[in-house]
Image (cartoon, rainbow, N blue to C red):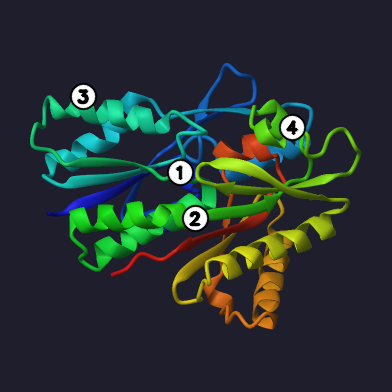
Amino acid sequence: MDYKIVTDGSCDLPPELCREKDIDVVPFYVSFDSENYRKEIVEMPIRTFYDQMVADPDTFPKSSMPSVQDYADVFTPILEEGKAIICICITTKFSGSYQSAMNAKEMLLESFPDARITVIDSTINTVLQGLFVLEAAKMYDAGVPYEKAVEELESIKSTGRIFFTVGNIDYLKHGGRIGKLAGLAGSVLGIRPLITLKEGEIFPSGVARSRKKSLEKVYELLWQYIQEVDAKPDAYRICVGYGYDIEEAEEFRKGAVRFLNAKGYAAADEEICKYQIGATISVHTGPYPLGFGIIKKAKI
């Protein structure tokens, strides 16, 4: 059965890569005034978004999930072509995007009763979700059957982790994502929180007193997980997720290659990619998130 990969805007894959891999993206919305919401990338380029964030640090933007109709508009042409759909959504702990996709599925089954639509709660987000989506695309390109691809995606999603730090904790507070991080940094000036995302939720992983120290500790968090799961370079994907500062991100990425190689983990320079974290997530992290996504590769 021929099928198409669909995901929501949380995946943070470059638009040109999505076009190359024939991945359809249903964008989130973003607003700086809580009234006028624009589609991320489509109507609000990510660079414009970050520039506005940095220029006006006292304004905290908000995001809004794709609607049922947004999903229906993307699903319908695919179903009209007689294709099945694998739709990969941001963790349900962060957004109702999954429910919008499910509601669109139920609505469209009335018109397309034989349609095959699988909506997956990825339990992850941002660039890690992007890696997960790329694994789906890789399986499609390799001719992996629909049901097998769904089964494999469900089996690897729990291996996904994000380890990152942010410029400060203010955006996490305003974005309502503080949760278990509430006591992490308190009000101590200059404290940088270290954060892990696993199983759809964020967890505190320590603090540092400078940007440099926080980034060094992010390296260590990644290495601890690699050891924990006995990850091998040919079995896991790793990427760097960054915000406003691309130069810092590239130095961080190069440093990661050196760090891992020094530990005996043969990380080829070209295999650790970097993707810019989009507006969907950066409304919660602020303009200076930086860290890693890592996930097990799908079996083909």
Pointer 1 with pointer 4, Cβ within 8 A: no
Q: To which quarter of the image does residue 202 belong?
A: top right
Q: Are marks 3 and 1 in contact (CB under 8 Å)?
A: no
Q: Secondary structure at mark 1?
A: loop
Q: Earlier in the sequence, mark 2 or mark 4?
A: 2
Residues under numbered marks 2 and 1 in contact, where contact means CB atoms less than 8 Å apart: yes
Name the residue rendered at 68%, 32% in the picture: 178
- Quadrant of the image containing the N terminus: bottom left
Image quarter of the C terminus = bottom left
Residue 10 lies, with reference to residue 216, above or below; the image says above
Residue identifier under label 4: 182
Q: Nearer the viewer, residue 221 or 57?
A: 221
Label 4: element kind: loop
Which disc, if any, is residue 160? 2
Residue 283 is drawn in which quadrant? top right
Task: Work out whether mark 2 precedes mark 1 in sequence or the reverse, and give the earlier one.
Answer: 1
Q: Is residue 137 above or below residue 97?
A: below
Q: Amino acid at mark 3?
A: Met
Looking at marks 3 and 2 on the same chain, the residue that comes earlier in the sequence is marked by 3
Which residue appears at 50% of the width and 48% of the height? 12
- The mark found on residue 123 in the picture is 1
Residue situated in front as seen by the camera: 198 or 141: 198
- Residue 151: x and y, percent? 27, 54
Q: N-terminal of the two: label 1 or label 4?
A: 1
Residue 122 placement, left or right of 52: left
Discs 2, 4 touching: Cβ within 8 Å? no
Q: Secondary structure at mark 3?
A: helix
- Residue at horizontal 54%, vertical 65%? 238
Q: Which residue is mark 3?
A: 107
Give x and y (percent) for residue 287. 70, 43
What SS does tag 2 mark?
Answer: loop
